[in-house]
Image (spheres, rainbow, N blue to C red):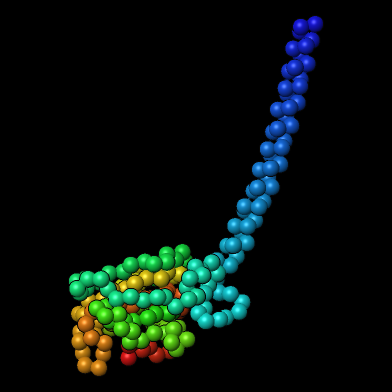
């Protein structure tokens, strides 16, 4: 009798264990379908142009804060000793390489008093510019602080770019004076020959 009862207990235990395994397998399958299906759907649009364009043009998966103009403030130091890039929003798309033409939104202000002298947001028009030219031994299309400072950043990023006067306009007449601060959103990378005539921010 004892042996029979032990056998029954083993059979019941095995049945329960089997049921638990089946339930776990089913649950795992549903979770996998939910997770990987959702992730696959996200990957279809991530870093890709949306069907409808608007201002500013944001690729799929971008941080929604890039849709709003940044709130600016002056620098906190007496001056900018060396160029400094501070990332406010970290992008996750392509990395900007020397020779790339990047499409950006920007606000330019004087570092010391925070006075805005130019902004693509005011014109509601993004700015395409080829960067990294000095690194390739070529003529820069923009001030040195931009040409060198935007290389290595990722599309989808918002950064503060603090530029010393020697990498800005070097106090040239008719240009913003002193150290400068730019809030720059890197929105896309174009083909290097599609700029159609570049301008210098602040001109």
Q: Position of residue 185 (x, y in %)?
A: 42, 74
Q: Residue at x 48, y 76 (%)?
A: 68
In terms of depth relative to the viewer, which is nearer, 157 or 179? 179
Is residue 141 shown left or right of residue 77? right
57 on left or right of 148:
right
Quadrant housing residue 6: top right
Residue 16 appearing in the image: yes
Left or right: residue 34 compared with residue 9: left
Q: Is 129 placed above or below 15 here?
A: below
Instruction: Please tell me how many numbered marks the rendered image carries.
Output: 0
Q: Residue at x 69, y 33 (%)?
A: 21
Residue situated furthest top in the rendering: 1
Picture coordinates of residue 42 (x, y %)? Answer: 59, 62
Q: Identify which residue is drawn at 26% across, 87% down.
A: 176
Q: Residue furthest bottom?
A: 174
- Across and down, in percent, residue 86 comes to 33, 67
Q: Can residue 136 be seen?
A: no
Who's the residue at 68% across and 45% down the image?
A: 29
Q: Nearer the viewer, residue 15 or 107?
A: 107
Determine which quarter of the picture holds residue 146.
bottom left
| Above or below 122: residue 46 | above
Residue 52 image-quadrant placement? bottom right
Q: Quadrant of the C terminus?
A: bottom left
Residue 70, position in %: x, y?
Answer: 42, 75
Q: Looking at the figure, which quarter contains the N terminus?
A: top right
């Amino acid at each position: 009798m004892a042996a029979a009862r032990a056998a029954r207990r083993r059979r019941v235990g095995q049945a329960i264990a089997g049921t638990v395994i089946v339930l776990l397998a089913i649950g795992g399958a549903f979770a996998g379908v939910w997770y990987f299906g959702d992730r696959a759907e996200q990957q279809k649009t991530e870093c890709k142009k949306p069907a409808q364009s608007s201002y500013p043009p944001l690729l799929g998966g971008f941080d929604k804060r890039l849709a709003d103009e940044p709130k600016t403030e002056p620098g906190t130091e007496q001056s900018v000793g060396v160029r400094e890039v501070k990332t406010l929003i970290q992008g996750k798309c392509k990395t900007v390489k020397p020779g790339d033409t990047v499409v950006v939104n920007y606000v330019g202000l004087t570092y010391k008093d925070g006075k805005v002298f130019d902004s693509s947001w005011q014109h509601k028009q993004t700015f395409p510019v080829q960067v990294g030219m000095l690194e390739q031994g070529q003529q820069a299309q923009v001030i040195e602080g931009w040409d060198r400072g935007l290389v290595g950043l990722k599309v989808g990023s918002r950064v503060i770019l603090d530029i010393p006067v020697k990498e800005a306009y070097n106090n040239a007449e008719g240009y913003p004076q002193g150290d400068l601060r730019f809030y720059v959103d890197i929105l896309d990378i174009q083909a290097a020959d599609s700029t159609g005539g570049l301008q210098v921010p602040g001109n």
